[in-house]
Image: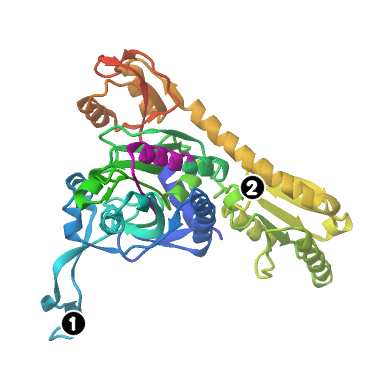
Amino acid sequence: MNKVITKRTEDYSKWYLDVIEAADLAEYGPVKGTMIIKPYGYAIWENIQKLLDKKIKDTGHKNMYFPLLIPKSFFAKEASHVDGFAKECAVVTHYRLKNDENGQIVVDETAKLEEELIIRPTSETIINNSFSQWVKSWRDLPILINQWANVMRWEMRTRPFLRTSEFLWQEGHTAHSTKAEAEKEAKKMLKVYKELVEKKLAMSVVAGKKSDSEKFAGALHTYTIEAMMQDGKALQSATSHNLGQNFAKAFETKYLDQENKFQYVWQTSWGMSTRIIGGLIMTHSDDNGLVLPPAIAPIKVVIVPILKNNEDNAKVLDFVKKLKTGVKECEIDYRPELSAGAKFNEWEKKGVPIRLEVGPKDIENNSVVLVRRDKLSKENVKVTELAATIKKTLLDIQNYLTEQAVNVRLQKTKTVDNWDDFVKEINNNNFVLAHWSGDREVEQKIKQETSATIRCIPFDQAPELGKCVYSGKVSKKRVLFAKAY
């Protein structure tokens, strides 16, 4: 694979697209804004999915599936929700095609639907329709479900993984008898996401609450984890919403409590999508291509035999086959049509954590050359020590990538107290902790003048009296501003 990757310092956006192409993760689909996730890219998603699915089930949730098509009338029931998604909805109006007099395929105008259908941008409405039928008594609560699905949001500007018209995700939906239970659930699931992203994806995030203008349409509160990319921009990596009773009242989802009185349920929803793969790429990768944390890498170790001539080749291949029996989760690159250098280059671009190089001289020394993808460092390892060295090195790589991500975020997070410093640090693509008055109008003016948004009100920010960086009004706490994807 000879794809030349643009340097990050020259064109970060082009570099990102080059890494995706070089690693053979995805390509654009035939419909504008869609993407085809290729086998290697999908294998990464499957590994993330497997880890997250276990965590979701371990917290008491069960998987279900709901229809892709949602009656338009469902959206009309919750006003703020429809306002939030109206411009992104794809609408199905007809159910049949036909051949016209010229033999061209056209929409059959007689097959118009009585009610238009919305291709789900998210599933709160259709799930609440079911909840309203399932919930009758306090004994029916809580309901704890999750679905793995695709959704469609008609985006104008798209980029593979980060923002596409159709994407894959999981969306959890729960119903509870009390506000306190729903709040606990929303924060619990955000913690699940934070642990997964930090411990398995080796990313560094800030957890907190969204401002009212940035929260999910129809939610009471939205909680988020915000990751810093290498260019200093933020990526919303997962969200969890306390929906309050907004959808319950819209869909008449209520139950008889223990005192035989009707009460509306309290709800949550939460999700993580394939956008996290974009975050993974922009957190760890370098000018040589993709870099993957071992915990989610489809291939953790690749063995590349260095073949020279027929006599030595047989020895090398026999040696490599024996190696594989003692090295778990590895793949052998046998392809005789490619040179060793071409193979090294390809696996480097694919971000495989460890590459083992084996040639005739290595056999003589009963050793292999071990190459770490994160540092591109090499060492000779005796075969007798290989299994233990691989185990330790994979752990070292995971820890190193985590440390690097944390260091980048800390180095590029600035605390400011005046507008000039705020503008300067935002223009340098840093995370900025600054006081904000809480005024939505001020928030919008800051966004208009700098393109920075309030990414979250961090949980770990202690109360601190100060003055709003823009208006000078009293502020009780700093919030996190940044430009974002």
Q: With 449 as the anchor, is 384 left or right in this view?
A: right
Which residue sits at x=73%, y=55%?
356
Q: With 70 as the anchor, is 12 left or right in this view?
A: right
Q: Residues within 10 Å of mark 2 (few under 14, many from 20)?
A: many
Which residue sits at x=54%, y=50%?
290
Which residue sits at x=71%, y=45%?
393
Cα separation between marks 2 and 1: 54 Å
Residue sitting at the far right: 364
Residue situated in front as seen by the camera: 100 or 347: 100
- For label 2, the residue is 373
Mark 2 vs mark 1: in front: 1
* Location of residue 61 in the rendering, given as x and y in whole percent from the top left corner: 45, 53
What element does badge 1 sit on?
strand
What element does badge 2 sit on?
loop
* Location of residue 30 in the rendering, given as x and y in whole percent from the top left corner: 33, 66
Asked whether the viewer can see residue 349, the reply is yes
Q: Amino acid at mark 2?
A: Arg
Using the image, tell me which numbered label, if any, was put on residue 98. 1
